[in-house]
Image: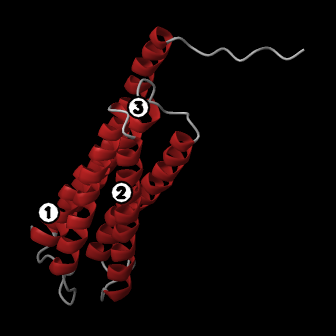
Amino acid sequence: MAKALHVPSDAEYADVSSQRLLGFLFFLISDCVIFGDFIFSYLYLRDVAPVWPPPGIERPYLYLAAVNSMVLFGSGATMHYAMEGIRRDRRRQFVAFILATIVLGSLFLAGQAYEYTHLHDTWAGSTFGASFFTLTGLHGFHVLIGVIYLITVFIQTLRGTYTQQRHFGLTAATLYWHFVDVIWVALFFLFYIY
C-alpha cells in the first residue's frame, strides 16, 4: 500500500526554507568565486599586456552593451515586482511581471548573440577575445539557466506549488536573477568602460 504524502505544516516549511536559503546562498557564493577567478585572471592578463586591447582588436560596442544592460537591469525590476505579487497574493501582478522578466532575459540573450556575431575578434583570436567570450559567455549561460528556471517556477506557480505563504523556489529564483544582474555590472564595467 502506498504511503500518504506528508504535507509540512507552515512551521516545518519555514524551518526547511531557512535551511534551503542557506544552501542556496552557499551556491551563489561559490558562483561568485568562479566569476571572481575569471575576473582576476582577466585583470592580470590586462595588467601584464603592454597594450590593451592588443593591437588590431576593436573594443566591443558600448552602445549595444548599454542597451542590453538596460534590458537586463529592467528585468531585475520586473522580477522584484513578480515576487511582490506572490507575497501580496496578487496573481495577475505575478504573472505579468514574471512573463516580462522572461521576455527581457530572452531579449538580453538575443542581444548578446547579435553582439557575438558582429565582433571582429574570436575566442581563439586573442587573449582579449578569450577573456571576453569566456566571461560574457559564462554570464550568458547563467542568464539562459535563469530564464529556464523562471519558466519552471512560473509553471509551478500556476499549478499551485507556490503560494503567498510558501514560495521558497520563487525567492531563490529572485536571488539568482539579481545575482545575474550584479555580475553583469562588473562585466559591463570591465569590458565596455574600463
Q: Is residue 41 visible?
A: no
Residue at horizontal 25 percent and vertical 71 percent from the top: 68
> What type is the residue that disc 2 sits on?
Thr
Residue under circle 2? 101
Residue under circle 3? 24
The image's mark for residue 140 is: none
Left or right of 99 on screen, residue 161: right
Up-down relation of residue 147 to residue 60 (above or below) = above
Q: Position of residue 62 (x, y in %)?
A: 16, 77
Pointer 2: residues within 10 angstroms few (<14), some, or many (20+)?
Answer: many
Q: CA distance from mark 3 to mark 2?
A: 21 Å
Q: CA distance from mark 1 to mark 3?
A: 27 Å
Q: Earlier in the sequence, mark 1 or mark 3?
A: 3
Residue under circle 1? 189
> What type is the residue that disc 3 sits on?
Phe
Quadrant in which residue 139 is drawn: bottom left
Q: Nearer the viewer, residue 74 or 179?
A: 74
SS for callout 1: helix
Q: Position of residue 142 (x, y in %)?
A: 41, 55
Q: Is residue 21 visible?
A: yes
Foreground: disc 3 or disc 2: 2
Quadrant in which residue 194 is drawn: bottom left
> What type is the residue that disc 1 sits on?
Phe
Residue at horizontal 41 percent and vertical 57 percent from the top: 99
